[in-house]
Amino acid sequence: MKISCEIIKDLLPLYHDGVCSDDSRETIEKHVLECDSCRNELLAMDEVLLINNKDQNLHEAEAVKKLSRMWKKGMLKSLIKGVLITIIVIAAIALVLYLFMDIRAVPKSY
């Protein structure tokens, strides 16, 4: 039974890590003996990934930290503004009710 390269390529990471079943391992080994494309993909998994962007990653991490601090600062300012505006609106409503609706804390004596 011939298995397509797409299925083999899906199984290659499992084979490479040694976590596939024995049947899958045998099938993959037979396939890579005949298929150059899949064999090359398996060999590419053995290559060490070089991380050349260390400085760029550190720079991006600092930028994210700075953005996070600015966002938190903005959130605090927004919270304070919201609380102050709420207090002012409640005070204005209470003042209007007091002046125009004749609502008093102490009842009038007649």
Image (tube, grey):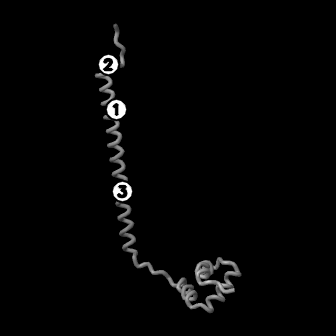
Circles 1 and 2 in contact, beta carbons < 8 Å: no
Q: What amino acid is found at the position of numbered circle 1 in the picture?
A: Ile
Question: Which residue is at 33% across, 51% downward?
Answer: 74
3 or 2: mark nearer the eye: 2
Name the residue that disc number 3 marks: 69
Q: In x, y percent, where is residue 71?
A: 36, 55
- In front here: 92 or 80? 92
- Left or right relative to 45: residue 83: left
Q: Earlier in the sequence, mark 1 or mark 2?
A: 1
- In front here: 72 or 12? 12
Give the vertical position of 103 relative to 85 (above or below).
above
Q: Which of marks 3 and 2 is nearer the N terminus?
A: 3
Circles 3 and 2 in contact, beta carbons < 8 Å: no
Q: Which mark is residue 102?
A: 2
- Please rate how many residues cluster around mark 1, counting C-alpha atoms within 10 Å: few if below 14, some from 14 to 19, many from 20: few
What's the distance in space between the residues labelled 3 and 1, CA to CA?
32 Å
